[in-house]
Image (cartoon, helix red, strand yellow):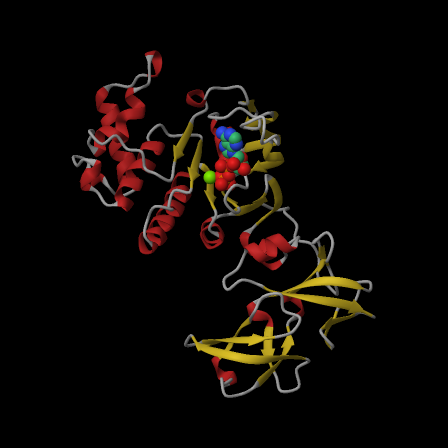
Amino acid sequence: MKVELQNLTKIFPSRSKKQGEEVVAVNNFTFAIPDGKLVGLLGPSGCGKSTTLYMISGLQKPSSGKIFFGDEDVTDLAPESRGIGLVFQNYALYPHMTVKQNIMFPLQNLKGEDRLPKEVMIERAYEAAKLVQIDELMDRKPSELSGGQQQRVAIARALVKMPRVLLLDEPLSNLDARLRLQTREEIRRIQKETGITTVFVTHDQEEAMSISDIIVVMKLGVVQQIGKPQEVYDDPKNLFVAKFLGTPPINVFEGKVSGGKLYLGEDAVLDVPGVSDRAVYVGIRPEAFIPMSDGPLQCEISNVEVMGRDVSVVSKHVASINPFVRSIVDADNKISVSDEFVRFYLKPHKVFLFDKETEQRLYFGNQKPASIEEM
Ligand code: ADP
Ligand code: MG
């Protein structure tokens, strides 16, 4: 089921007269989620992810804009008529019911013509439970399950009505690190198996990158960039997106472009043809640095962290905005903490320039904007 958001906007009135300002939680969000894809809605806390999800679900009414499921305008449709499955961060299972009863609950609520015979309900509950691999636990109460198992029950409950669209709001946040990883792989598998169009909300960039066909990066209610995870990582449109994606995070410098060359401090570190003379922010991915004794960028070594195949060189540079510059280089380079300085060449496609005022990307050489076609 294709899900289309058209100029979707949500404005919350101010809570008190004194506080004044209304909150534009979601601002003019337009995007068509292709049928059968998993879209990761990503951004810091308060950027409007949940509000977007609640509008798709019908739990909140948009201030303006429209929502389509396929060709059907669902903007004014009640949540229960939309054919959605919802999963929240806290599992919200009924404690007095067994797993089976919890999963069957949405089916038991169906009225009139939609009501299914009891055997069919049980069959459906087992199918959903099998999908999330909890069919052995059907007679337990939620208190007898681990967090990960409880979240699987919640997912099974969302799947049992065979939703047209699956909506997940930070579903892994309450799980410990190992379970989080396992459950996210599980969600991905289930989504692929069922082909249900899915929106997955998270503030965790790594989670979004690893699970999504498409990511949508939001900031203060405004969509910043939409694309395949790798494309957005490789070609961020602005400084915010560049900083939000990647571990370790991108290194940011203050720089200057003059005569087609990029200067960090006094040193011309890279040719940047096509950018006019100006002050810039420079984002350099940790994997951009190539250690070479004649490299143009000199950094003062603070630490070398061994990671096996690679080493992380922690260093200082006067133009760096962060206290340290983090580079990930091949361990064969034999860089040592006892060396005072290290010199680097930079891989041009891992270096991003941003206008100092607008923080929008400036493309140089053969860099070009990521496209969202062919999704
Ligand atoms: P996220 O899920 O990305 O953390 P939300 O969608 O929950 O963000 O919130 C977006 C913005 O809208 C925040 O500034 C939040 O305080 C505000 N907001 C959310 N719900 C309400 C509400 N019911 N009333 C007023 N403001 C709200
Ligand atoms: Mg939220």
In this rendered view, identify the residue nearer to me: 241 or 156: 241
Relative horizontal placement of residue 349, taking residue 112 as reference (left or right): right
Residue 254's x, y, as percent?
69, 65
Residue 253, located in which quarter of the rendered image?
Answer: bottom right
Residue 130, located in which quarter of the rendered image?
Answer: top left
Q: Is 165 drawn above or below residue 334 in the view shown?
A: above
Residue 195's x, y, as percent?
43, 39
Q: Residue at x 30, y 35 (%)?
A: 128
Q: Is 336 drawn above or below residue 8 in the view shown?
A: below
Q: Is 38 drawn above or below residue 67 in the view shown?
A: below
Q: In the orientation shown, which residue stands out farthest toward the front?
A: 18
Q: Residue at x 29, y 46 (%)?
A: 148
Relative horizontal placement of residue 20, taking residue 263 as reference (left or right): left
Q: Which quadrant holds the C terminus?
A: top right
In this rendered view, identify the residue nearer to me: 338 or 102: 338
Total labels: the figure holds 0
Q: Is any part of residue 37 visible from this angle?
A: no
Q: Residue at x 51, y 47 (%)?
A: 213
Q: Is 178 drawn above or below residue 167 in the view shown?
A: below
